[in-house]
Amino acid sequence: MDIDFLIIGAGIAGLSAAVELSALGHVLVLEGEDAPGYHASGRSAALFDGNYGAAPVVALSEASLPELQAAGGLLSERGIMFVAAAHQAVEFAGLVSDHQLQVLNFEQAARRVPLLKPGAVAFAGYTDQAWDMDTDLMLQGYARVLRAAGGRVECRQQVNAITRVAEGWLVRTVSGAEYRARNIVNAAGAWADQLAVMAGIKPIGITPMRRSMARIPAPGGLDVKSWPMVVAVDMSFYCKPDAGSLIVSPAEEDLVEPHDAWADDMVLAEGLARYEEMVTEPVTRLESSWAGLRSFAPDEVLVLGPSLQDERFVWAAGQGGYGFQTAPASARLIADLVAGRVPELAPDMVRALSAERFG
């Protein structure tokens, strides 16, 4: 048996874990689609916001930021502006505190985003502590490092059977291929619970949530490239510059079954209507639309490390919308737990992220 770690799923979770685990043994990554990063990783809003998520998620993001900054080319300036209507004063005040926002008057906000509608936007707050992420470059970088370490990725290998054997695991794919490995790493995203059941491991309750996106032309012919991401205080929409256009999302979290997601036209229309309420230019046409699945554990915190039921079954799941910005520290934590090393994160954060919290 020459495979020490068989990683199922070649999104950002699987590839980053593969790189860290390659120092501990031979790694093979299986991907059911034609290329890595096809599902959630290929449909990310691609923003690093270190204040996004629960405390354990924030800890992972903070621990990941130095590596992302040092890599060169992965992060570029963007910033975030939160906007609110007059009746949302309480919610806005909470965000100012949580995100350490600079409060702007309307004129200051409109200088950053000339699209904002007077009278509709009553409150605005800004932080420059958010960056665009080159997610494609990040995926390619991990794949390149993995190959240099002797690991490999095999695509079009959809797993359909997993059997526990004395020395580890026997994994079969739809194509008829068989793999024997000492350890399995479950980085299957929306399919993580299904994979666990296949292996005889108790599912955690990973729930895929659809999020839709639309790309629209730059409103009014404006130059949008320096605008921050704009987020409604109640998360009813957000918009962000992208290659000279704007991407606008309803920011929905609709529970769905694992599948190759597509945008729901009605949900998209409702989100665009909420966006239009806060801006001066109506949406006249879409350049494109798409959707991705953001998969969450019941507590909306990542699930990282060996299963309490079987230490040779390792979770790398529940990334939600945090996968890219937490990938470096998440992968290191998985490797530390597998190797029996003391993790860099505080013990309470490690416990909050551990798969053992679900028994």
Image (cartoon, rainbow, N blue to C red):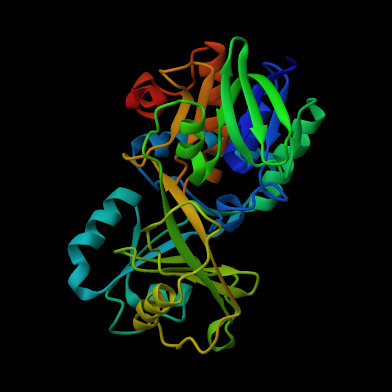
Question: Is residue 61 in view from this perspective?
Answer: no
Q: Position of residue 157 (x, y in %)?
A: 70, 41
Q: Position of residue 255 (x, y in %)?
A: 37, 56
Q: Position of residue 291 (x, y in %)?
A: 52, 63
| Residue at the extreme front | 176
Q: Please determine whether, in this image, residue 171 is positioned above or below residue 284.
A: above
Taking the image as shown, residue 119 lies to the left or right of residue 279, namely left
> Foreground: 231 or 256?
256
Q: Quadrant of residue 268?
A: bottom left
Q: Quadrant of residue 77?
A: bottom right
Total residue callouts:
0
Q: Quadrant of the C terminus?
A: top left
Q: Position of residue 135 (x, y in %)?
A: 64, 51
Q: Quadrant of residue 125?
A: bottom left
Taking the image as shown, residue 51 lies to the left or right of residue 306, namely left
> Foreground: 147 or 57?
147
Name which residue lies at 45% across and 71% down: 264
Name which residue lies at 62% across and 55% down: 42
Name which residue lies at 45% across and 81% down: 115
Q: Please determine whether, in this image, residue 173 is positioned above or below residue 274.
A: above
> Foreground: 101 or 330?
330
Q: Please determine whether, in this image, residue 332 is positioned above or below residue 51.
A: above
Name which residue lies at 53% across and 12% down: 341
Q: Quadrant of the N terminus?
A: top right
> Foreground: 357 or 96?
357
Question: Is residue 139 in view from this perspective?
Answer: yes
Taking the image as shown, residue 294 lies to the left or right of residue 172, namely left
